[in-house]
Amino acid sequence: MYCPYCGASLDSCPSFCSKCGKNITFLKGKVPDGNEPSTSGGKTETSSVDCFMKFRAIKEKERKTFFTKKSHASKKDKGVKIYIGSMERHCGVLKPLRGKRLPLEVETNWTSEQVLIAGKKKVKDFNQDMEDGPYVLLYPDGSEVKNIPGTNTPFKLQLYKEAIGKAYQRITLYICTVEDFFATDCNEDSSSEDSVVQVKFTSHSQHDESDTLIWDSADEAGSSSHRPPDHSLPVQEQEAGKIRTNIQEHVRDQQKCYTNYTRLYAPIVIESDSEGSDQSTQHVEEEWISDAISAADIVSDLSQKIIRTSCSRFNINRANIWDGAVRGFKRASYDPLHDMLVKFTDDEGSTEDAVDTGGPKREFLTLLMDCLKARRIFDGPENGRFLTFNNAAVREDEYFLAGRMIAVSIVHGGPGPRFLSNMLYDYLIGRTDINGTVEDVTDETMKAALIEISSAESLDELHTLIEKYESLLQTAGCFDFPQSVKGKDNIVKDFILWYIIYRNQYSVQRFRDGLSTLDVINALQQHPIAFRPYMCYSVDRLTAVSLEDVFKPQLSEPGSTRRQEETRILGYWRDYLLDTGEQETGVSLQNILMFATGLDSLPPSTIVPQPRLIFERSSKFPIASTCANTIKLPVSKSYDEFKNAMDFGIQNSPGFGLR
């Protein structure tokens, strides 16, 4: 016989197994052949094999029941996670709102109504300024969620997931107010002012006017679409006028949006009958575009491509910004489209306890631009740096890396370099009429030669100087004997162009390749005036008035005692900015902005979130949060006390803003 527990072979029929020690007394009534039950005292004794099989069947049933219940219960209780965002209509187009996407726990069998209710509650919980009106659920393309796209099947989350072939975590739906969803006017206030080119209609025309692109025209302010009908006209002409009016009304909603699109993306096409007017016409065109579109609008459009759900990590030590930046940008997993997560380490090597919601990233990009200015790849005056060739920098591809750093800084909310020479910037944006000065030449021998040539007063003196510096001019490719003294200007101009651009052509090209990251080089070429103050040195730096406009005070209820106290401190704050701008305090306006936002200058993009002023009564020194872009002002008793507290707090601020 065998033990039913461990399978050991037993010679007799003991009460306990000799191997596992289990009680097997129930086997003593076993029939020798194992086929017939034995009877004892009128009772039938079941064989040990039958008992064992029955026992195993019971345990197997219990096991299946246990695992089945546990699996279903776990799946039912867990649910799935998708993302819910918000949409608003801008210029007639529904667009997702940045920074409004939130995770949402849902069930796989939910309908569109259930997702809408849960999504609306989720968004309202995190956005107090959300409107109370009715909402609709939208797909990413702006269409309403009713059926599975391309079918008549009612929407269910599981069916939608199977249709698009994505995981639940990659599904994003949006909510939008009913008013925005059904709105058609791009700008009701300006629609009456916009006019269209009148399209002449005849009854013999074979083309469809709905296919005609109607453009804005300021000269056609008196368009026939705004005139009352003239009943004296023939019936056919009246009907034609009605059709023309309907066509114009149909496209009027799209005119302003299309105009904005062409201003942002259309190439600059300049037509002129004379070559002499090309330069002036180009300047007028650039100024018009600069007035129409701000750098913040352009950067906002470029930043739409950034994937906020993924991030590239940077571990930075303030003692060596460049080293940490190079490691981060050269990491194999780095992607410019991913958001940036920056962590600073102090001198002891411990990581700051901070979550990067914008502050550390902005400070890192600010410090990086300052570090980039002093790199070996740049030469020239302090406020007009140009590229210079360096073999070691070429081996490490530092020129491309520098261009990429600048492009990433601009799109990710950081500052521009503000130190490039105007000549280099003009060449990068494709200008041909670029000029430099002798002061841009850093080589003293070459500068002295150019000064002598430009100072020549006679043709014989000029020719003598050209022969004297023959080898130098031949190297630059501008060795020539002009027929008049005025020819010296072309020689100097060509030499400076060679010195700054052509001899560094490889460096400039790799730098341009780096600027093409995130399509920044195209933005510079199409809107050079808008970006010039952020790429080149500008005298109009940060002022007390501009800094005052940046920070929005958060005041208490009107008429309250706190409000009166806060307005008094607000006056101190504005006087403090004026005194700082006049250099009457121990800090600068750049220090104040750096203290609050991690930026030492206003970036091309909008500072998000909006910088705010909060009034702090529990501390006699200012407290800043670069992640929230806030300054908590101390409630001081006098202006002198406020001024001293601000100076001390900003100059001794640890962490963010420490320069």
Image: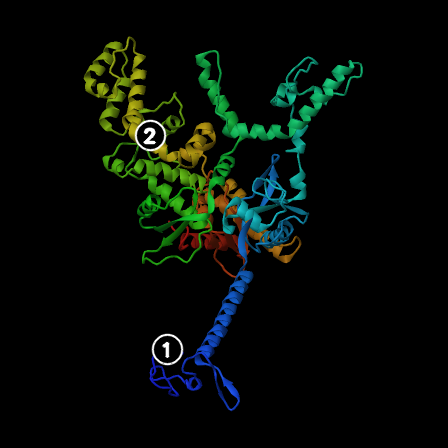
Residue 99 is situated, as x and y percent measured from the top left of the image, at 53, 47
Q: Nearer the viewer, residue 40 or 241?
A: 40
Label 2 Cα neighbours within 10 Å, binned few <14 / some 14-19 / many ≥20? some
Question: Three-letter amino acid code at disc 2?
Answer: Gln
On the image, numbered disc 1 is attached to which residue?
6
Residue 360 is situated, as x and y percent measured from the top left of the image, at 42, 50
On the image, numbered disc 2 is attached to which residue?
509
Q: Earlier in the sequence, mark 1 or mark 2?
A: 1
The structure residue drawn at horizontal position 41% and vertical position 27%, both measured from the top left corner, is: 429
Picture quadrant of residue 522? top left
Question: Three-letter amino acid code at disc 1?
Answer: Cys
Left or right, 635 with respect to 111, comes to left
- Looking at the picture, does residue 517 appear above or below residue 210? below
Whether residue 21 appears in this view of the structure is: yes
Could you tell me how far apart the alpha carbons at marks 1 and 2 are, in whole angstroms?
Answer: 79 Å
Whether residue 585 appears in this view of the structure is: no
Q: How many marks?
A: 2
Q: Say what secondary structure mark 1 lies in.
A: loop
Residue 234 is situated, as x and y percent measured from the top left of the image, at 78, 13
Q: Say what secondary structure mark 2 lies in.
A: helix
The structure residue drawn at horizontal position 36% and vertical position 42%, both measured from the top left corner, is: 370
The structure residue drawn at horizontal position 61% and vertical position 27%, both measured from the top left corner, is: 255
